[in-house]
Image (tube, rainbow, N blue to C red):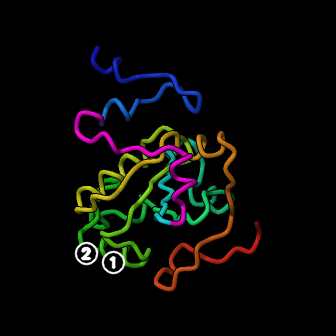
Amino acid sequence: MQFMQHLRVSKFCKPIFHLKRTFSTTNPNVLVNSNWLKENLNKVKVLDCTWYLPNLNKNAFEEFQKEHIYNSQFFDIDKIKDTNSTLPHMLPSSELFEKTMNNYSISNHDQLILYDSSGFYVASARVWWTFKYFGHNNVKILEGGLPAWKHYGYDTTNQFIINNNNNNNNNNNNNN
């Protein structure tokens, strides 16, 4: 019955876990809303953490290439993992995580905002936990994810960040 207390219906996706209530007992500032992100977009680093179950036949990176929040980078949970494990999505080694974050030009001093394109928080919450596990305390989740961002009329782009340290997943795309 306690599970049902955390369930709510959202205008972006239904039903979902209400993270604000779930996290409020330990950290009341886990979520930021779209308005806050829009006002602070040039002061933070944004990661699209979208991931889909294999049976959905959707490719999160291909969707990122078509549409994402300006200045976002793609966090690929299928690649940033323990490569020695046969189980999916196990935490990466600290060395792999540090190397990847260096490639993304992310340091422990950066304010990170995570989102996913479903708005269900599943992927972004997992990535939030991963950053917390590795000691990054300045990380938050965009409430409602990409659906909320678009609902409030904020623009998306298909242009990628050019990052001198990151040749892995951020290539220039001149289409707007």
1 and 2 marks in contact (CB < 8 Å) = yes
Q: Residue at x 24, y 33 (%)?
A: 25
Q: Residue at x 51, y 22 (%)?
A: 9
Query: Disc 2 marks which residue?
Result: 95
Where is residue 70? Give x, y as percent: 61, 62
Single out the residue that lies furthest toward the right. Answer: 175
Q: Secondary structure at mark 1?
A: helix
Depth check, front residue: 83 or 127: 127
Pick the quarter of the image with the N terminus: top left
Query: Disc 1 marks which residue?
Result: 99
Depth check, front residue: 151 or 126: 151
Which amino acid is tagged 1? Lys
Q: State which region is magenta.
A: 24-42
Single out the residue that lies furthest toward the front. Answer: 39
Where is residue 55? Give x, y as percent: 53, 42
Which amino acid is tagged 2? Glu
Q: Quadrant of residue 5?
A: top left
Q: Residue at x 42, y 78 (%)?
A: 103
Query: What is the CA distance from the residue labelled 1 to the residue labelled 2?
Result: 6 Å
Q: Is residue 92 magenta?
A: no
Judge the density around disc 2: few (<14), some (14-19), many (≥20) Cα neighbours within 10 Å.
few
